[in-house]
Amino acid sequence: MRFLHLADLHLGKQMNDLTLLEDQEWILRAILKIAKDERADSVMIAGDVYQRSSPQAEAMALFDRFVSALAGQGMRVFVISGNHDSAARISYFAPLLKASGVYVTEAFEGRLQNVTVRDEMGEIVIWMMPFLRPSQVRRYLPDAKIETCQDAVEAVLQSAPVDVKKRNVLICHQFITGSETSDSEELAVGGLDNIDAAVFDAFDYVALGHIHKPQKVRRDTLRYAGSPLKYSFSEANHKKSVTLVDMGAKGDVRVRTVPLTPLHDVRCLEGMMDELMRMDYSEDYLWITVKDELVPPDARVTLSTRFPNMMKFSIANSHTNTDLDVDPRGRMEEKTLPELFSDFYSLKNSGREMSETHRKVIEKLFREMEETP
């Protein structure tokens, strides 16, 4: 049986106030073509379908078209919610969708949802674990000592009736210790969301989401598919792909990746003005750093004639390393709630920053709000 493993679509995401829906529709069409060309039997989407828990209508319509096209080709689709998603919204109509071969994680109530599929070699059990917070699991497993995400995931897996004699696949959206991260992911301060890879040893393949760089963790069959697009300049050197998993008999799992080509790449360029202006015209999303000692006052405007989608402009020379980004405070869409509150506080208090004590109180408050079911 052949699976296509995706994750971290983040539909509706913006970069520097520019909507990426056109880019996302482009890449989903490319993924659909790969799924058809490779004759995938199923598609696993390991969380963070949307950028926000309340996605805009256009993002929801795009996902609907994508899943409908996959199901229309006779492929099963498995979807779990990630930390960016609203689990309730993702699971809407989940029981009804099963009739179409689309399986979506329902609201977590203390046990893992699983679906058994069959091929010529027998049964494959697909286990679906949405993004879990310790408070969610404590509610349903009060006898277990649960303080961290590691505790929560271990408790849930230990209570699941996994038959290790069968072929088992887990779809999961968590941070595994040792994974290589980027700036566009939301990770808990202090490593409270870290999970040891060993907790997944019972599964023949673990389809991970949450980390945007495609990578294996400890073994080839414990993998992050990565995001299909680059969502920050820290991902400029990533090689985006989708993961194809061929599952034969028990213990026979073959994994390979298929590269993805975006509508607009995300790249970092640097050099002298005359060197940059000799480069080919490009509509990629760019961070350009000019290294001239004397930078013309209209350098940004001049560069934009050749690079109309320049998102960030910087100067780096012997006089200054000043970042001349259009919005040095950062884009609202990319900030956490505590950071937004800190900006609001500064705005209302003549630019004065919050004290460290106040900052810790605010971070604790928002963390408790997120963990409240």
Image: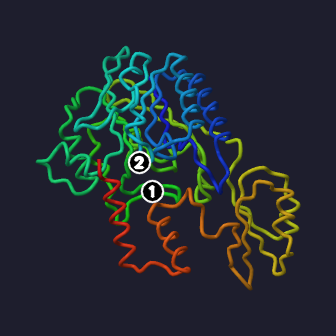
For the residue labelled by badge 2, is the local secondary structure a helix, a strand or a loop? loop
For the residues marked 1 and 2, what is the alpha-carbon distance in whole angstroms? 8 Å
Residue 157's tag is none
- Determine crowd level at label 2: few under 14, some 14-19, many 20+ residues with C-alpha closer than 10 A: many
Question: Label 2 amino acid?
Answer: Asn
**Residue at the (31%, 30%) spot, across then down:** 168
Q: Residue under label 1, please give it.
A: 186
Q: Nearer the viewer, residue 297 or 161?
A: 297
Q: Judge whether 20 appears above or below 329 on screen.
A: above
137 on left or right of 329: left
**Residue at the (54%, 28%) spot, across then down:** 64
Tell me the quarter of the picture where residue 110 sits: top left
323 on left or right of 188: right
Quadrant in the picture for the N terminus: top left
Q: Nearer the viewer, residue 280 or 70?
A: 70
**Residue at the (11%, 48%) spot, across then down:** 143
Q: Residue furthest top?
A: 120
In percent of width and height, residue 174 lies at 37, 48
For the residue labelled by badge 1, is the local secondary structure a helix, a strand or a loop? loop
**Residue at the (69%, 56%) spot, across then down:** 267
Question: Label 1 amino acid?
Answer: Glu
- Colour scheme of this structure image? rainbow
Q: Residue under label 2, please give it.
A: 83
